[in-house]
Amino acid sequence: MHDTDVVVTGVGVVAPVGLTPEEYWAALLSGRSGIRPLRRFDAARLPSPLAGEVDGFEPRDHLPARILPQTDLMTQYALYAADRAIAESGFEPGSPLDVGVITASASGGFDFGQRELQHLWHDGPDHVSAFMSFAWFYAVNTGQISIRHDLRGPVGVMVTEQAGGLDAIAHARRKVARGARMMVTGGMDSSLCPYGLAALTRWGRLSTAGDPAAAYLPFDRRAGGHVPGEGGAILTLEEGEAARARGARVYGRIAGYGASFDPPPGSGRPPALIRAVEAALADAGVAPADVALVIADAAADPGLDAEEARTLAAVFGPRGVPVTAPKTLTGRLYSGAAPLDVVTALLALREGVAPATANVRDVDPELPVDLVLGDPRPITGDAALVVARGAGGFNSAMVVRR
Amino acid sequence: MSRRVVVTGIGVIAPGGIGVKPFWDLLMSGATATRRITAFDPAPFRSQMAAEADFDPGQAGLPEGAAERLDRAAQFALAACGEAMADSGLEVEESAAHRVGVALGSAVGCTQKLESEYVAISGRGAAWEVDHTQASPYLYDYFVPSSMAAEVAWAVGAQGPVSMVSAGCTSGIDAIGYACELIREGSADVMVTGGTDAPIAPITVACFDAIKATSSYNDTPGSASRPFDRTRNGFVLGEGAAVLVLEEAEAARRRGARVYAEITGYASRGNAYHMTGLRSDGAEMAAAITAALDEARCDPSEIGYVNAHGTATKQNDRHETAAIKTALGEHAHRVPISSIKSMIGHSLGAIGSIEVAAAALAVTRSAIPPTANLHEPDPELDLDYVPLVAREQRVDVALTVGSGFGGFQSAMLLRRFEG
C-alpha cells in the first residue's frame, strides 16, 4: 500500500508513570504503577475509585501563561508532548506548508466543557468563556499544535475512540508518503473530571476493584474491567532517507497499518479484528513469524480478551508470539493509549526487551496467549504489532520496525 | 491506471428540505430556511436564530427507539445514510463487507445529549460532582462521537475501515477526503461518508455569542445570513447531515451504477494563525485549493462553479475571496461563486458534506445555486457571487472549500464523469 519508508524521529510522552520516554520506559521495566485512588475530586459516590492520573505535570513550567486559560488539560498535555517530540526530532522547518499535524482524541476537552456547562446553566449565558467554542471541541489539539509551531501543512483529527490513535498515525504516514516533510501525530486524552467519569461509569467497562494491584487484569481469570487513565504520546514522522540524511535519531519505522469494523453486537458473526491485523502485516510486508512482540489492546473484559487472544492465535499460532500490555501500569488512556503503545513497541525493539503485563498472575487457561508476566523478557527480531480496539467495534493494528 | 472515486448515492437532511429533492428545490428557489429558534427559548441569547431541520425520525424511517436512544446528530446521519444507500442501489453482501467502510465527520458530536444529560445529573449546574446514577445508560455513546460512525456502519453492514473525523467546520469535507484516500490506496472499494451535526442547543449558541461570530439580525431571521453582502454581520447556526456513497469507479461501472460525479482532488491545510481568526490573505486556503488542483491534474480555468464557505462573517468572506483569487488567478473573476449558507445556515461539521452534495448536484444537473440575501455587494468583494437567482449552466468541474476553527482549510474538486 505504501512503499515510502516513514520513520519516527521524535517522541513526546505524557503518562501516569512518566513525562519523558526515558522515565516512562524505566517505569515499564521496573513495574512501577501509576494507578492510585483518584485525587482530582471527591469520587466517593463512584463505584470505581481508581485512576491513572498524571503526576507532577505543572502546565506553567511548560507553556506560556496566556495559553492556560484557553486550554483544557488534555490540550496542555498535547502541547507539551508536541514540544518535546519536535525538539527531539531536531527538525528545521523550511516552508511551514510542508509540515502538518494529525491528532486523535476520544472525547475532547471534557473538563473544560463541564466547567462551561456549569457556567451556562448555573450562572447564565453571559458567563460562558470566549474560549469554549474551541477548547472543548475534538479538533483543538491539532489546531493548537499547528499554531504553536507554525505548521501549515496537511491537518486532520481522528476521533475513533480508542482506535483513533493508530488511525491518526497511519493518516500522518500517508501524508509523509505523499510529500509532507514532517508530520506531528499521536493522541491525547484526559477526561477524569466528574462528568467524564460519570460517562465512563455508565459505560460499564470500569473495574470496581479498590486494590490498585488487582483492578486491571487483562487475560486474567479475574478480569473485570479496566482502570481509566490520562495522557498519550505525540510523535514526529519523516521520510526515512531525508531523516537519516540530516542526521536525525531514528526510533524506528511505521511499517504497516490496517483497520476493520466488527459486525453488530449480537449478530453472532465473528469479530473482524483479524482482518486489521492481517492487513497491517501485509502492508508492512512482514510475516507473522518475524513479529517479535505484540502490544495488546487488553480490554480486561472476558469476551473482548477472548476475541483478541484467539485472533492472535489464529495469526501467530497458539501462544505463538510474546504478548504484553504495559497499560496495566497506566490505566487505559483512550485515544492516547495506542500512540503510547507505539512508543513502547519502538523502545522494546531497540532495547531487545519486552516489558511485562503488570499484576496479572492467573491467565485464563482457555486463552491461547503467551503473556509476558513477572519480569521483562528478552526479545529478538525487528518488528512489533500494536493492536487498538474502540468501543462499538473499531479495530486498528499497526506494525512498527526497527 | 490509478483507482478513481465516484459518487453513486446521495442523502441529505437539511433545513428546509429532508431529502435530496426538497434540498435541491430549496437551493434552486433561493428561499431561506433561517428562522427564530424553536428548539428552545432563545430569549436569553444574543443571536436567537437558526436554520432548523423539520425532522421527524419516524418519517425518516429510523427504527423504533432510535429517537430516544440517539442524539439528533446520529439520527440525521442514519437518515441521510438510508437515503444515500437506497439512491445508490448498492447492496452490501456479507462476503464483501470488509471492502466497505465508513468515514463520518462531526464538529461537535452529540452536543445536545451531552448538554441535556449534564443538566439532568448536575441539578441544572448546581453540582460539580454530578450524579452518574441519574444519567442515561447511553451516556458513553454521547461522550464519544465515534458512536455515530458505528451506528452508520451497522446500518450499512460495513466491516472495512470505519472512522470518525472531527476537524471542526471542515469535518464534512475532510471525512469525504479521507474516504477518497482509502478507496484510492485500495483499503476499501466502497466508502459511505459524510458529515452530521445538530448543534442548535443553548451551549453552542452561548459559545458563538461569546465571540460574536453569529448574526444579530434577530428581527429579520429569514434574511440574517448575508454572505458577501456589505451588511453581513455573522453566520446563522444550522443543522443537518449529508451522506455520500463513494465507489471505486471501475466497480461502479461494472454494476451499472448511476454516477453523479468523480471526486478528483482534495487537500487540507492548517493556517497556524489563531483558533478562531483568519489571515486576510487566505494563503493556506489557496494552498489547499492549489494542492487539490494538482492532485486532480486540473487547470483552474476548468472550474465552472465554486461552492464557497461563505459564512457571512466579515473576516471569512474577505479571507475566502482572497484565497480564490490567489489560487484561481484571472479565472476567479469569471467563475460563479455562491454560498448556500445564505439559505440553510452553517451546520458546522455537516455543512462541508452538504456542500459537497450540492457541488455534485450542480455538476449532474447543470445548475448553480445562488447566494440568497445578497442585495448590497461589499465593494471590497469583487467576484461573481451569483446573487439571489440560481443559474442554469453547465458545470464540468466544481470546487468546494471549507474553513474552520483551529485553522483548518480544505478544498475538494468534483468533475463530470465521462467514464
Image: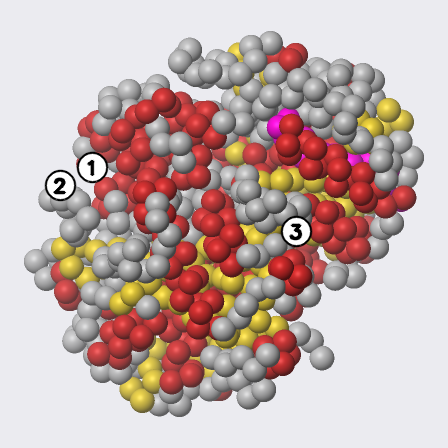
Question: Which residue is denoted by mark 1 in the rendering?
Answer: A125
Tag of residue B405: none
Tag of residue B44: 2
Secondary element under disc 3, as helix, strand or loop, is strand
Amino acid, disc 3: Ala
Q: Which quadrant of the view contains residue A226?
A: top right
The one nearer the camera, B46 or B257, is B257
Amino acid, disc 1: Pro
Q: Disc 1 versus disc 3: distance between alpha carbons?
A: 42 Å
Disc 1 and disc 3 in contact, CB within 8 angstroms: no
Residue at horizontal 38 percent and vertical 87 percent from the top: B366
Residue A390 in the image, given as x and y percentages of width and height: 58, 40
Q: Residues within 10 Å of mark 1 (few under 14, many from 20)?
A: many
Q: Nearer the viewer, mark 1 or mark 3?
A: 3
Task: Identify the chain of the residue marked 1, using the numbered disc in the image.
Answer: A
Rendered view: B365 above or below A300: below
Question: Which residue is denoted by mark 3 in the rendering?
Answer: A259
Q: Is residue A148 magenta?
A: no
Rendered view: A119 above or below B314: above
Residue A64 in the image, given as x and y percentages of width and height: 47, 33
Q: Which quadrant of the view contains residue A28?
A: top right
Task: Identify the chain of the residue marked 3, using the numbered disc in the image.
Answer: A
Q: Looking at the rendering, in which quadrant would you find the N terminus of chain A?
A: bottom right
Q: Residues within 10 Å of mark 3 (few under 14, many from 20)?
A: many
Residue at horizontal 64 percent and vertical 51 percent from the top: A260
The one nearer the camera, B281 or B166, is B166
Q: How many marks?
A: 3
Q: Which residues are magenta?
A: A290-301
Secondary element under disc 2, as helix, strand or loop, is loop
The one nearer the camera, A222 or A68, is A222
